[in-house]
Structure formats: C-alpha cells, structure tokens
Image (cartoon, coloured by chain):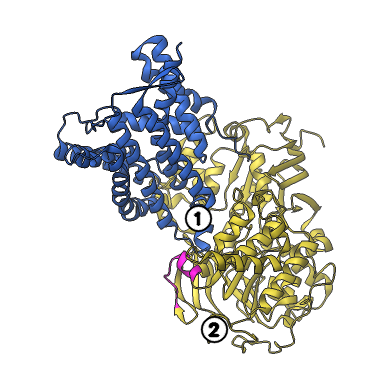
Amino acid sequence: MNSSDTALTVRGLGKHFGGVTALDGVDLAVRRAEAVAVIGPNGAGKSTLLKLIAGVHRQDSGTIHLGDRRLDRLPPHRITRLGVALAHQVPRPFHGLTVRDNVRIGAMAAGPPMRGPELADLLALCQLDTKADRPADSLRVLDLKRLEVARALATRPQVLMLDEVAAGLVGRELDEAIDLIRRVHGLGTTVILVEHIERVVRELVDRVLVLNWGRPIAEGTPAEIALDEEVRAVYLGDGGSSGGGAPAANPRDDSQDMKVVEQDASASAVPHGTDGDVLILDNVSSGYGDMLALRDFSLRVAPGQIVTVLGANGAGKSTLCGTLVGTVGSRTGRITAFGRDITRLPVHERARLGIAYCQEGRRVFGDLTVAENLRLGAPLSLPRGEVGTRMERVHTVFPVLAERAGQRAGTMSGGQQQMLAVGRALMADPAVLICDEISLGLAPVAIDALYQALAEINAQGVAILLVEQNVKRALGICDHGVVLSRGRVSYRGGPEGLLDDADLDAAYFGAPASDTSVPTTVTAAATTASGSPARTTGEPS
Amino acid sequence: MSLDVLAAGILAGGLYALIGLGISLVFGVLGLMNLAHGELVIGGAYLASLLVVDAGWDPLVALPLAMAAMALIAYPLQRYLLTPLLRGSKSAPLVATFGLSLLAQALFQAAFGTHPKALPAAYADTGLSVLGVRVQTVYVIAFGLTVLLCAATHLALTRTRAGSAVRAASADPDTAAVLGIDVNRVYAVTFAGAAALAAAGGVLTGVAQSFTPSSGLPLLLTGFAVMALAGIGSVGGVLAAGVALGVLQSVSVGLFGGGWRDVVVYLAFFLVLAVRPQGLFRKAHAG
C-alpha cells in the first residue's frame, strides 16, 4: 500500500506478558479517513493492540508506522504528539477540574495551544458545550464518554483509537455515542474501534479485523465477517468435547421444564445440612461507578444443581460473580446463601460460609508452590490432618497437582493453573462452587479434563454456578441455564431450550427466533459477535 | 584497612538489617511506607528501659517483653486506624504514620524527658576477640539475635500456612479474600510482627548507644536505605543489605573520617534507586 494514503501500518506485531501470548503476528493497514473495527472475544488481544500502538506497552516483535514514521520506539507522549490518540473504555477525567479544563489539558499535549474558538468547536462537536463549566465529577456516563473522546480529540489526532467507548451505554445513550463517532469520522479522522457492541461496528466501520488469542482469524466487511463460520465458532465456544470422553456431554434428563426457575433439587447428597436453596439472588442490581452491569437479576441455585450463566462479553457475567462473592457491592436487591442474608457480608466471611469462587484468569499465586496454593484454600483454623485429607481428595480429582506439588504455580501451563484454581476452591469444602470462564484460553483436551472434574465434583454434592462463554460445553453439563444480555436475563430454563442454533441466537443476540432464513440469522449472530441484542431492552421473552 | 573495621561494619549491619526488616515487611505486604517505624524502634527501647533502668533487669530478658508489648500496641493501630485509611487512598495512611511518628515523639518526651538514655548492661562496653579481631560484645549479641530473628521471620513466612496467607495477601489481596482470608487481620498481624522486630532492634540499639525521643528518624532513614538495597520480598536480601550498608559505612569512616558516615549511606541509597530500583538482591520482575 502506498504510504501516502496509509495512515497506520502494523506489521507482524507480537507481544507476550510473562508466558501468555497476547498478540502474535498481527498485520493491519488502515487507510486515511478509514474506520476499522477490531473485534474478538475476551483475551483476544484487542486492547493490547491499541496499547502497543499508543506506546503504553512495547511490542516484542513487529513494527508500527504512522505514514512513514516509525512509532514503536517512541515514548507514549511523542506518539500522541504525532497524531495518535486513545480513548479508554472507563473514562478517567481529572476530578475537580471542569469539563473545559479537562479538554484543555488534553490539548496541551499537542504542541500549539488550542485557542478559544477551536476549543469551543470541539466542545460543541462532543455536545459538551452546555456543560463546559461543570466539574467533570458531576457528569453522567454518556457525558463522561463524550469527555473521554473530547480529550482524545484535543490532541488533534490523525488516528483516533476508541477502546470500547460504547461499553455500558444503553438505548438512546448508545445512539448518541454512535452519532458522535460518526461525526468525528466525518471530519476526516481515521478511526480504529475496539468494540463488543455489534450495532456500533455495523453502523460505523467498513472493515473488521477479528482476533482470537492474539492471532488474526478473519478480516473483511461487517457482512463478510457475519458469514464467517470460524468467527461464529470463536464466539460460541468450541462446540463440545473434542475427545468425547466427558461424562456429561449431554444435557441431563431431569430438567425438562423450560421455565424451571425453581425446579426441585436434583442432588443426591445435600452438603452442610442445608435445606432449601444454596444461593438466592432476588432482584439484584450492581455495577461500577455510574454503570449498572447487572439489572434486577434473580437466580436460585439448589443444592447439588449445576446452573450455567451464559452471555457475550459485557453481558454482566463477571459482575454477577463479583456481586455473589462480595467483591462488587450490590446497589439493590438481596442475596441469600444457605438461608442467611449475605448482601452486606464481607468477602472473606462469605467464603467461609461455603461459597468458593474460581475467578476469571485463574488468579493462582504464581510465586507460591502448588501445595501452598492449595493449602490457602482451606481455612487456617482447620487441623493439619484434615487439610491433608482434603488435599488428597483434590489430588484424586486432579492428579497433576500431586505431581507438581513443589513447583511454583506460575511456571505451570494454563490448563494446570486452572486445575489448581479449581482445586484450591475445593479445599474450602464448599457447598457451592462459582466458576468464572474456566475454559477460557485452554486447549480442548484441557477443557475436557476440567469439565470431567466438574462432573465429579458435582457428583459429590457440590452445587456449581458455571459462568461461561463456551456455550456448548456449559449446556452439556448444566441442569439449568440463564442467558444474560447487557445485564438482563434474555433466557431462563433448561439447556435443551438453547441447543438449537436459532434459539441460542435469539437469546444471545436478540435475533428473532422465528426467522429461520439462514443469512439473516447468521448475520445477526455473528456480526453481533459478542454484542448486543437487536432489542435494546433485552427483556426475557 | 584493618579487619577490625570490616568486622565492626558487618556487626553494625546486623542492627540495620533488623530495623530494615520491619519496614520491608510492612511495605511488601501492605504497600505502606511506615514513617513511624523509627518510633516503634525507640518505643521498644523506652519500654525496655522501664524494666532495665527502673527494675534492674538485664536488657536481653526485657527484650521479649518489649517485643510483645510493641506488637500489642501496633495491632490495634493498624487494624482500626491505618487499615481503614488504606481503603481510601495511598497517601492518607502515609500521612497518618507521619502523624503517629510526631505523636510518639511527644509522648516519649512527656514520659521520659529529653535527656539521652541508655540501657545499662555488663556487655555494653566490653569487647572480645574473635580470631584475633577486636569487636564490641553488644554488637556480636545483636548480630546473632538479628540472624535468629531473620531466620524465624523467613521460616514463618515460607513454612507455615499463616505465612503463605501473608504472602498471598501481599500478592493479590482480592483473591486472598475470596479464599476466606481476612486480609485486614493479616495486615494487622504483619504490622504487629514488624513492630516486634522494631522493638528488638530498639533494645539492642539502646544497649549499644544512647537514645532520645528524636532518635527514631535516623534509624528510619537507615532502614529505608536497607530496604532500597534489598528490594522487596526477601528476608535474606534484607540481612545481606544491612551488612553491606554496615560495611560501606564503616569502611568509608575509616577512609574519609566520621563526617562521611551518612553521606555514604544516602549516596548508596540514591545510586541503587537510580540504577537498580528493584534492589540489589532481587531479580527484576518480568512483565
């Protein structure tokens, strides 16, 4: 491509964080005034790509050019001055400063100071002109997003990179955000968009790059990407077991009712002498700052049950987990565990009640040995002998943890670390195990082993709340499924109600379930990628 | 350069390490720069003086009591004052420890006066000969105790479940809480442990030299220098850094005279921060 019409060229970009490959051989050429979207599931490397371009991180291999100028050896402020700006998903304005001053400070980074009229134009473009003298702290979500974009634009960028700026917006707010980006693009700014919300991508860009585990897997127009089978597979999981051996590869027979919200416990053993439900969430809303990630959510988990919560990125799944274990505070509603109200209980006390949590990203203590990690899962007051007994039980489920007992956890493979995280959670002898994305980033054979272990754990009477992006896997093991879409429930019932592709699409992406014409359905499914339902309200059908 | 100078440096370095260990522990686990650490040291010396000067005890007998007493004072300070502040911002607890430092100095002054005090002991001024090298007895005792306390701290952190809980809370407090570890309590226990180590350092300092209510500051700065040299997270590194600093100081005094004592310490401090911010005895973190 001729450099005169190329704004930004990325060649063979690679980046590792420790042993994790975040980006591997990514090429991208963006023409002047073009709008390009980068999409992909969690951990695909989208944000890493933007951060490498902005100079926040350094690549391990490859080059980045702005026109003919090489960027990848320059410090971030030089890159900003050359005309590359990055707007973040979570706006971080300077608190205590007015909106105008926040934008003006952005302008200071870019050479000649922005004079009054230019600043006024920029504020008007971002529809902040009427709020220019208000303190940034007083802004609501949409205006904070506008301010984030305005601050990025104040550096007079040739290339504007937007990292999920539409995240957390709903309804009219989303329309407004799309309009803003369209206006900015209309002024001739090159736009690179990382986005989960399908509508934003479809309405704004001509070209989409799809990443998965740091590698480009598809590139094309939004319509072409929508028809790409590989992209669809990436978003909906690998489609079941690879080796076949998993015992729970088929949905259980004991969950026939589509609306079995309060279906009877299928458990044979009821641990901890609880009667009634293990966990009850009653109209719980929670989120971060001004954004509600979970809205009026209700759920019951019966003893010994496996409940799966599905949904695309940003649907509110991890917020749900955080709300349950107490790392995210709930705004409204009530959470009950084993008949006790735990809505205001601190994190460690909830854990001691028998709620074990495997966080997304494993979160093992890398500097500690495997055995030390496991022991930490047991209460400190537990006698040594009992700790040993529990470790043996974990070792029978995950023999590799016995072989690696003395090894530092950080040096194990991803699959082994995930096994350690699950094993560590089991050391608490929990009544319920919450697993957040335990198949993320693992090879199918490792996922087989984990799901087999989950079935064994469940057979011992432990209820499991399984939060997954890997739809087919989760549906293969669960008694009851809930699909979240932008913080609200879009499906609730037995797993068999989601096995059909059209039904799954409807719950996941909001495509009309009755519409069976293939192109339409697939388009709705795959372009949404990890995105939004066509119905912005996302109410359960 | 005589071996005497070298030996004196090594032994004095033991005391530096003991003071640096508490600072390093609190910073490593809580992420808190405890500006009142010098007063924890001097507080230990004053507490011991109640038993040694007024009741005639041997300082080494008073030492474990002073350690326990400082730990009991420190625990609620962390649990009910500093930990709630840690939730807010990074600077609030830092400022609070500075306030505590001033408050403690005022308390020392009110209770004990401004006159220099010392902890009298039979071995305070005697010397002994080891392999033909003359050393002060008190520094030999201090060095031995330091090695013992460092080893005990190291074993407690690496060989016990409570120790792994401390390391877990240090590495990832959120995950530790999810596992049922009461992170606030871990913080308070760590702070109390650091205060006990400080008190031990205070008693030994009090035997070796005299102290006043304002003696804490130079001790704090020496402790910071030790931590900077050692880096965070290695008890052995702290011991090595203390000894290195002691030798450096002793050698420079021997070469340039007593006026250069502190200059050399702070030069080493800044050089290490500039060249190897992760410390001399710690591998650079990947990523």
Residue that label 2 marks: A277
In the image, A28 versus B76, the foreground residue is B76
Label of residue B165 in the image: 1
**Image location of residue B65, percent across then percent down:** 29, 47
Q: Which chain is blue?
A: B
Question: In the rendered image of this protein, which colour is used for chain A?
Answer: yellow
- Residue B72 left/right relative to A477: left
Q: What residue range appears in magenta?
A: A341-352
Query: What residue sits 53% from the left and 46% below the top?
Result: A150
Q: Is residue A110 above or below residue A511?
A: above
Mark 1 and mark 2 on one chain = no
- Residue A292 left/right relative to B126: right
Determine which quarter of the picture holds residue B34.
top left
| Dot 1: element | helix
| Dot 2: element | loop
Name the chain letter of the residue that bears numbered label 1.
B
| A348 in the magenta segment | yes
Asked whether residue A21 is in view, the answer is yes
- Residue B143 left/right relative to A72: left
Name the chain letter of the residue that bears numbered label 2.
A
Asked whether residue A168 is in view, the answer is no
Residue type highlighted by circle 2 = Asp
In the image, B92 versus B226, the foreground residue is B226
